[in-house]
Amino acid sequence: DADVTQTPRNRITKTGKRIMLECSQTKGHDRMYWYRQDPGLGLRLIYYSFDVKDINKGEISDGYSVSRQAQAKFSLSLESAIPNQTALYFCATSDPTRRSADTQYFGPGTRLTVL
Amino acid sequence: GDSVTQMEGPVTLSEEAFLTINCTYTATGYPSLFWYVQYPGEGLQLLLKATKADDKGSNKGFEATYRKETTSFHLEKGSVQVSDSAVYFCALPSGNTGKLIFGQGTTLQVKP
């Protein structure tokens, strides 16, 4: 089984709808991240969490919110989706206590289309 | 702030050709440097990394050397295969958040 999973893998929704993307990990890592990928822009950080009680905004957090329900779960919500939030969304984890602390492990991604 | 710049793609090569994908960076200090690969329909996977100047990361026939003097971390492979077709991202960790700063990605297409 994959260490970092994301659901759903694909989602089409309409402008104004509320959407939640979920991420689960079995790696036991404390740190989790949400990125979005847009063609020609690489990946940009939306939110990150160091543990259940420590959540921080990334560079493009406007229009998004997150919830860290447990060490293993980190959800991303779009309260009122808009078309320019159409993108590929990735969850990632890392473990700062390990020797390879700066290595991140990515989920398979969620492709979101907002019509 | 920290940044990563990659050569623009797409890069189209014939099988067994030599590959170079350029990556340069701007950073405070000397962070680790990464290459991630994204195969079609999949998430990003760590391809290789280097943690200090003059280190060479290598994996699956790919290599990249951390060049402090030119602030570069170019990805090379001597003989590409069709299965290497993917998007390649250069990245570095920024600050104490652990977040990664990514280049824009370079699409590689290898034709038989």
Image (cartoon, coloured by chain):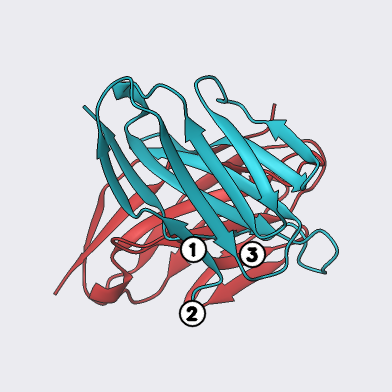
Amino acid type of disc 1? Answer: Thr
Crowd rating for badge 3 (residues with CA inside 10 Å; few <14, some 14–19, many 20+): many
What residue is disc 1 on? A5
Farthest residue, direction right = A97
Q: Residue B3, labelled with which disc?
A: none
Which tint is chain B?
A: red
Amino acid type of disc 2? Answer: Asp
Residue A48: percent from the left, percent from the top? 67, 40
Q: Residue B49, labelled with which disc?
A: 3
Locate residue B83 relative to residue A99 in the image: left or right: left
Residue A13: percent from the left, percent from the top? 26, 34
* CA–CA distance in space, label 3 to label 1: 24 Å
Of all chains, the one bearing label 1 is A
Residue A45: percent from the left, percent from the top? 58, 36
Q: Chain coloured cyan: which letter?
A: A
What residue is disc 2 on? A1
What element does badge 1 sit on? strand
Query: Where's the N terminus of chain B, which quadrant?
Result: top right
Q: Say whether marks 1 and 2 touch (CB < 8 Å).
A: yes
| Nearer to me, A70 or B56 | A70
Q: Is residue B80 visible to the viewer in this orientation of the structure?
A: yes
Locate residue A103 relative to residue A46 in the image: left or right: right
Q: Are marks 3 and 1 on the same chain?
A: no
* CA–CA distance in space, label 3 to label 2: 25 Å
Locate residue B8 relative to residue B24 in the image: left or right: left
Crowd rating for badge 2 (residues with CA inside 10 Å; few <14, some 14–19, many 20+): few
